[in-house]
Amino acid sequence: MAVGVENTGDGFSVLRKAGKQFHFSDLAVLPNTKKALGCQAATFALKNGLETSVIGIRRDDAARFTNTAHDTIRRYFGNKIDHFETGF
């Protein structure tokens, strides 16, 4: 079970005993929240069909987390596009 998530600059690192790191480009969709084991979870669906979740967080915290993750991902790709459009 994951205990948290850390922003690595170009992806996320899921904090747990056997941690998992993935890049923003590995995501199939933006992270979302769902109910899991009687509480909320922030879930990352990956392009390879796997799913990673941070389970056991409050509903407000899950929503705040996914909103922050969405903003972080959009800013990352927005910066990539801006960098490309300005000619590197």
Image (cartoon, rainbow, N blue to C red):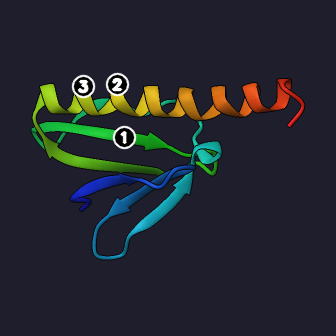
How packed is label 3: few (under 14 Cα within 10 Å), some, or many (20 or more)?
some
Q: Quadrant where the N terminus lies?
A: bottom left
Residue 59 placement (x, y as % from top left): 13, 28
Q: Which residue is mark 1?
A: 43
> What residue sits 55% from the left and 28% below the top?
75
Residue 23 placement (x, y as % from top left): 58, 52
- Residue 29 appears in view: no
Give me the C-alpha separation between circle 2 and circle 1. 12 Å
Give, as a three-letter code, the residue at label 2.
Asn
Residue 67 got which mark? 2
> What residue sits 22% from the left and 32% below the top?
62
Q: Which residue is mark 3?
A: 63
Give, as a three-letter code, the residue at label 1.
Thr
Give, as a three-letter code, the residue at label 3.
Ala
Q: Which quarter of the picture shows residue 86?
A: top right
Q: Nearer the viewer, residue 54 or 74?
A: 74
Q: Are marks 2 and 3 in contact (CB under 8 Å)?
A: yes
Q: Are marks 2 and 1 in contact (CB under 8 Å)?
A: no
